Image (tube, helix red, strand yellow):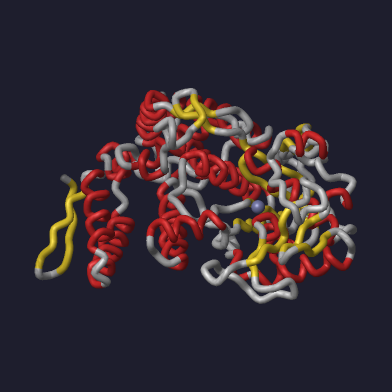
Amino acid sequence: MSDTQPRLHLHDSRTRSTVPFVPLAPDNVRVYYCGPTVYDLAHIGNLRAMLTADVLVRLLRHLYPRVTYVRNITDVDDKINARAHANGESIADLTTRTIHDFHEDLAAVSILPPDVEPRATHHIGEMQDMIRSLIESGHAYEAEGHVLFAVNTYPSYGALSGRTPDDLIAGARVEVAPYKRDPGDFVLWKPSDDQTPGWDSPWGRGRPGWHIECSAMSQRYLGESFDIHGGGSDLLFPHHENERAQSMCCHPHGRFANHWVHNAMLLVNGEKMSKSLGNFLTVRDVLRDTPAEALRLLLLRAQYRSVLNFTREGLNEARQMLDRFYRALENLDPMHDAVPAPDSVVQVLCDDLNTPRALAEMHALADAAMAGDSKAAAQLKTAGNLLGLLQNTPEAWFRGDAKVDPARIERLIAERLAARKARDFARADEIRNDLAAQGIVLEDGPQGTTWRQA
Ligand SMILES: [Zn+2]
């Protein structure tokens, strides 16, 4: 990092303060984010966490020569087992399809893939090694086929989330079970019956608890100490508290995550999103009638630690802002293509990822560009690169092509063909109907399937 570059300041959930970000090793900044549990489509709350990570990693890549970004996939979980059973499909079919859809949704919103995307089921050995070591050091115990972490063996338990052990129990966020020595103890390993996925272990055939998955995968790819661990604020307790307890007890000389980043929640029309309120929105629900870039911009209009209220009006405003930016880009002179990202934008992003101020700076650049300043237009474009915006040409944006992703449609056509070959006509019809709802008409002919916009 050069001396002239602005210094990144990030809020740290553990110390509850905004501090200068100091990498453990500046030649390789290491970031871990908790990825999805793959049983259902991503909703826009999930998207906010993935997008916060994307903006953070884009900025880190701008500031440092190398960044290693790991985001896991939880593909063993009781919610997955229950959903596969309810759908009457295999766990493998459910997780494969959900991972595919997740990747597709994130790509639509220009979220870059992580460097490593480990799957929990591929790292059971590492989890068992950690559990064994925690038992040997007296931090975990075996009871009725379960292995539990004994929270009272880690005096700093609660320090990350700021809760005391009494709060934890009073909050009834813990499951009381007869085999637990303390109600706050949590599961590292649990038994599986014949109907449930399981692996052989010294404690019988079973499967890991959720928290140990992230501890094992972060250690495998990032080491005992790494720079940033992030996720939605809903993960702070118990998930991240438990990850930290396990990892710190396993590696007392490591630091686990040096810095914790949590984004605030997302509301829909001022209310918490829930299936029972009927305001539960998947990424696909929104993208059916909205360009993906407008959704991305809407989510960036609030700083990640502020609660974000998603509304249709907000989405329309985001669209109008993009109209304005793309109008300004019509003044782009190809000679100016290679300008560096403007300091004004980098500086405000370095202030704890202040994306609303970055967008205000982009508006100022758009003003100058529309007044004929072609360098400002070029700077607007590079600022857009930093935020994952303005990746279309103005022509494509104003034609409305930005809504249609031909590669995605081709993939869905291939998936529909495969479904028909497998005589899964329900899935084939679902793909046709989903595309129709997005204004894409499929036409089957002797040469195969083609598509057109309705
Ligand atoms: Zn995690």
- In the image, taking residue 349 as reference, residue 228 lies left or right, namely right
**What is the total number of numbered labels drawn onto the structure image?**
0
Q: Which of 453 and 121 is in front in this view?
A: 121
- In the image, taking residue 380 as reference, residue 248 lies left or right, namely right
- In the image, taking residue 5 as reference, residue 102 lies left or right, namely left
Q: Position of residue 339 (x, y in %)?
A: 53, 43
Q: Which residue lies furthest to the left in this view?
A: 446
- In the image, taking residue 413 as reference, residue 77 lies left or right, namely right
Q: Write the residue at 39% across / 64% down.
A: 89
Q: Position of residue 282 (x, y in %)?
A: 41, 42
Q: Where is residue 434 in the image (x, y as percent from the top left)?
A: 27, 49
Q: Which of 372 and 28 is in front in this view?
A: 28
Q: Write the residue at 36% across / 27% down.
A: 316
Q: Which of 19 and 306 is in front in this view?
A: 306
Q: Write the residue at 49% across / 26% down.
A: 271
Q: Quadrant of residue 265?
A: top right
